[in-house]
Image (cartoon, rainbow, N blue to C red):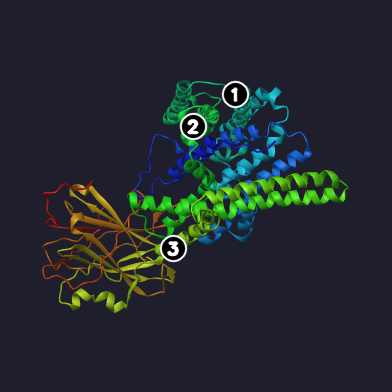
Amino acid sequence: MAQQKIDSLTSLRFFAAAAIVAYHCRGHFGLSSDFLAPFELSQGVSFFFVLSGFILAFVYPSLDSSAARSKFWLARLARVWPLHLATFLLYLILLPELIKGGVASVAAHSLANLALVQAWIPDQAFFFSFNTVSWSISTEAFFYLSFPFLIRNFERNWPLKLAGSFALMLGMAGIANLLHLPTFADHGLTVHGLMYINPLSRIFEFTLGMSVALLYRRHLLNTKASATSALLLEILALAAVYSATFYTEKIAHALSRWPIVGSGGLIWLEHAGVPVLAFALLIAVMAWGRGPVAALLRLKPFVFLGEISFATYLLHRMFLHYYWDHFAPERGLLPIACYVAFLLTASYAFWALVEVPCRHLIVNGARSDKRGKNDKRGKNDKRDKNDKRDENDKRDKSDRRDKKAASLPAGGFVWRRALAPVFAVSALAAGFVAIWSGPALERCTASGAILSAAEKNGVHECAAIDESSIAFGDDLKLLRSSVLQDSRGLTVTLYWQALRAQKLQNYISARLLADNDVLVRFKDYRQSAREEHVRAGECFSNRLFVPLSELTYVKSLAFNLGRAVGPAPQARLIPQARLVPQARPIAPSKTIELSKPSPPSDTFNESASEPAREPVDAGASIALARPILKGGLVTLQLQPAVADRSAKPVL
């Protein structure tokens, strides 16, 4: 059957992908870990599974011959594998440090990913290897293999197949409950791997989409209705999705009390089971397309975003990893806007330069090979007729394209076909250059770290930490610190010594605190904007600048050292040696307390630019105090107030 496209459903793909992107952005850019709670945004994957079953059953209502099945599988391979391969290779380039394990394990994980079977193995080391979100593509690959068998006689036995897929999910939940599996683990069998990742637990959603497509074709496709009735049905579908996703947690925990559900079924209910019927209703109503919401979804901008949503889905998590692991994330709307713009630009580039051309190349190449074989078998007459028909179709399409190009503004056709992908790639390259640009690391000798520039100018500086002070594992040692307050704000200078040769990928996470350690704001700084290499024994300094406007109500500044490691973009504290206090107070007007850092309470990061080094103001105040252990943080207690207390704090 000729491929059919429903624009309103294409647009819905973008919104499902956007929900997943928002889910993974929790904890980044200043967004809280419960951003948009209690909505379970990861349910966008379940929507994709239902939508996939609906589209395939609608486009391919039957696959009776082996040739039809082969053609279907080839089309599915051409749809997902080229972009999956491209993002797999991009992952190797961008995030090689996240590839863990020996040669044998890396080879096994690579083969599983390239064969799209990683989700079939219920071990996190496999299904979350490399580009983690590609597990869902592996699950979809299982659905594609199963589809020709599911669609066989589907009009007669669809209730049996739907019930069987649901029973299979319950059986997987029973196995998880019977074995008392842990919910999560880095290795081995887990409830998460069985009930959230494994295709046997998720095939019910796909079969449900197929069933809805059959019922839609029978009862809704050609049904007429007024605009008001269609709008009411759309509102009903949207309200069902809203309610199901909003109350997912409460409904899932209530149902998990049934013995047949248990903790195993709870995972499936939270991520798919509760809203799955609402998703099916929404898909059928929007495919029907009689209401104003569906008409809105058919607008070209939404359809375009839906077209590139597959690339958006495969790229977004990788970019978050790279951004978190290599650069200081900022808070606010500006970094979010930059990330979204960069992601959509990259998505378009991969869609235009990889996904679409490779799909056409694979499908058309297979057709050409088949035609050659048929010619050799003596079926030239029939093939010649088809070739003539194809040539006429191509000629007609070319004529229509030329007419359309002629109607475009000058250069419009060239822009859309050639210059836009080039522009997208250029924008990505410029983005990477802009990200990598930054101030060079301020290096110094060991003696320079002990005798600072401020002391050379005759200004007292705190020498609160000596050589035997804080060691950060086997990586760094904090030799000295200084605190300077002038008319511009507060500058904290930290002097470090590298204990081994390394690439600097650390964050200095600072917290501005009011009375009783009430948090005013976070400010995070990269140790090296360019991730420069330092040699063992080499010394360097970092300056943390806080503008005077941000010091309102601030009485202390606490900081620690962390970096993002592992497969997930979560910061952890680098282990440190015990602090040995040996400093003496110089200026009693302020108290500076130093103590051993501890892990931050959250993982958000915010970068702040540092001003160029300037002569110290005449009114500058620098202080020293005996270092103490306090609250697990390196704390600088500022007394008296450092700013006007008449303004309200920013909490």
- Residue 415 location (% of width, % of height): 51, 56
| Residue 71, above or below 320 | above
Q: CA distance from mark 2 to mark 3?
A: 37 Å
Circle 3 is placed at which residue position? 430
Choose between 81 and 33: the one closer to the eye.
81
Q: Amino acid at mark 2?
A: Ala
Indicate left or right for 212 with 271 as reference: right
Circle 2 is placed at which residue position? 294
Choose between 176 and 157: the one closer to the eye.
157
Residue at x 22%, y 51% (from the top left corner)? 513
Choose between 362 and 516: the one closer to the eye.
362
Number of numbered discs visible in the structure rendering: 3
Q: Amino acid at mark 3?
A: Ala
Q: CA distance from mark 2 to mark 1?
A: 16 Å
Q: Residue 288: which quarter of the image?
A: top right
Tell me the number on the disc at residue 276.
none
Q: Specify which label sits upstream in the sequence, 3 or 1.
A: 1
Q: Specify which label sits upstream in the sequence, 2 or 1.
A: 1
Q: Amino acid at mark 1?
A: Asn
**Residue 116 can be seen, yes or no:** no
Tell me the number on the disc at residue 222.
1
Q: Specify which label sits upstream in the sequence, 2 or 3.
A: 2
